[in-house]
Image (cartoon, helix red, strand yellow):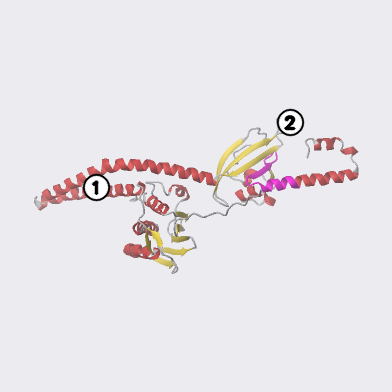
């Protein structure tokens, strides 16, 4: 539609013939339908607001981003339909707004929106309304987080080399001197020895604890190469359960196994994956505090992946902690180091897999491991067809 068409039409509306009016209305309907089809085809969300901030139009993408029903959203104030933007004033605003927003319903997404006024050529002080453009930045945000994590791990790796030298060697020396001191104490009278032996034993236990933390730290950040063997994943799971069985039984926790009988052998490092299952199962039973504790373990296999599921009906993970599960030394346990999940994810990723964690407070946690059968092989694409 040419610029100024509506203004010219309004200026001569009293002189327009009835037949011409029908043609004009038909043209307006066609133009409106064309623009709506263009807006609906956009992958970006589009919302148009009137001067009071009420929704006059939203396309399909915007409806999906925010979980809105277009029929119910029209005529409603956007601040009542979309949380997080209620503090943005739209009344008479001539300023553009550029913001990032994180939403959790209907899907967890990172969005970026640009809110711009629609100028009124006859009244520059008051806009006709506002247009909001919304982009889904979830994938780019995830890529940025991965880059930050990679930089963090590289820094930790450099730190690990210094820690191993500056702390590891003195710890070994202290332990040797405490052993020598313990031999001297054995020559004392029992009455004199009893009090001092307790202090020496406490010091040795603390040295062992520091040594364990140091080894876990080095294991978490130091790059390793898996020693792959063709092994049965179900067998590794059962072996790990056997190691943990006394503790699980003492807590009165039941274990429900659903292990697929049609699992092909997996090419992996069995020692590393026993450590993965050990850490995850230990986390599961430690999260269960009441009666009727249950751990479910399920294995399945698709054409390309192994899928291992470990879930519990424990206390769950608070929402505010979900974003920092894999950060070193972040733990809710009084005696934990916060390195277990970091080690688990590093091992899984070194095998080409990925880990997914879902949790609800007071309902439990479910962990899914996706592990490829083999490394993806190159695929020859068909030759392009060239017309001359």
Task: Inspect the magenta stretch and tell me whether residue 39 lies in it.
Answer: yes
Q: Nearer the viewer, residue 194 or 233?
A: 233
Residue 232 in the image: x percent, y percent? 39, 64
Residue 293 in the image: x percent, y percent? 41, 63
Q: Is residue 255 above or below residue 92?
A: below
Residue span colored magenta: 33-53
Q: Which mark is residue 156?
A: none
Quadrant of the rendered image containing residue 310: bottom left
Can you see residue 40? yes
Label 2 element class: loop
Label 1 element class: helix
Figure quadrant of the N terminus: top right
How packed is label 2: few (under 14 Cα within 10 Å), some, or many (20 or more)? few
Give the residue at x 56% y 51%.
107
Task: Inspect the magenta stretch and tell me whether residue 16 lies in it.
Answer: no
How packed is label 1: few (under 14 Cα within 10 Å), some, or many (20 or more)? some
Q: Is residue 112 above or below residue 205?
A: above
Quadrant of the rendered image containing residue 257: bottom left
Residue 142 in the image: x percent, y percent? 50, 46
- The residue labelled by disc 1 is 207
- The residue labelled by disc 2 is 123
| CA separation in Å, label 2 and label 1 | 77 Å
Give the residue at x 11% y 48%.
184
Give the residue at x 45% y 68%.
262
């Amino acid at each position: 539609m040419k610029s100024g068409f509506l203004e010219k039409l309004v200026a001569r509306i009293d002189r327009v013939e009835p037949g011409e009016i029908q043609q004009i209305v038909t043209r307006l309907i066609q133009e409106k339908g064309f623009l709506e089809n263009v807006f609906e085809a956009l992958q970006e969300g589009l919302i148009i607001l009137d001067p009071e901030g009420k929704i006059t139009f939203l396309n399909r993408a915007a409806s999906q981003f925010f979980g809105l029903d277009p029929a119910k959203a029209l005529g409603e104030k956007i601040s009542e339909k979309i949380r997080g933007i209620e503090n943005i004033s739209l009344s008479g605003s001539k300023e553009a707004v550029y913001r990032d927003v994180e939403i959790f319903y209907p899907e967890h997404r990172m969005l970026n929106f640009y809110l711009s006024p629609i100028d009124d050529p006859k009244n520059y002080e008051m806009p006709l309304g506002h247009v909001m453009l919304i982009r889904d930045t979830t994938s780019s945000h995830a890529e940025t987080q991965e880059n930050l994590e990679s930089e963090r791990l590289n820094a930790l790796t450099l730190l690990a080399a210094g820690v191993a030298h500056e702390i590891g060697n003195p710890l070994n020396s202290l332990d040797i001197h405490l052993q020598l001191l313990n031999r001297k104490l054995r020559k004392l009278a029992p009455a004199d020895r009893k009090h001092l032996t307790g202090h020496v034993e406490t010091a040795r236990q603390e040295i062992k604890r520091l040594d364990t933390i140091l080894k876990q730290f080095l294991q978490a950040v130091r790059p390793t190469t898996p020693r792959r063997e063709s092994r049965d994943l179900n067998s590794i799971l059962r072996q790990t359960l056997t190691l943990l069985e006394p503790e699980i039984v003492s807590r009165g926790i039941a274990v429900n196994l659903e292990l697929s009988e049609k699992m092909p052998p997996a090419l992996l490092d069995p020692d590393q994956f026993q450590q993965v299952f050990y850490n995850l199962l230990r986390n599961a039973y430690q999260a269960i505090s009441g009666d009727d504790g249950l751990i479910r373990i399920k294995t399945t296999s698709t054409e390309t992946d192994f899928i291992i599921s470990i879930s519990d009906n424990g206390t769950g993970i608070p929402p505010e902690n979900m974003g920092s599960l894999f950060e070193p030394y972040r733990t809710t346990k009084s005696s934990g180091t916060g390195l277990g999940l970091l080690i688990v994810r590093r091992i899984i990723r070194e095998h080409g897999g990925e880990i997914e964690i879902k949790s609800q407070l007071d309902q439990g946690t479910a962990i899914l491991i996706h592990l490829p059968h083999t490394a993806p092989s190159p695929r020859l694409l068909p030759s392009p067809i060239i017309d001359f």
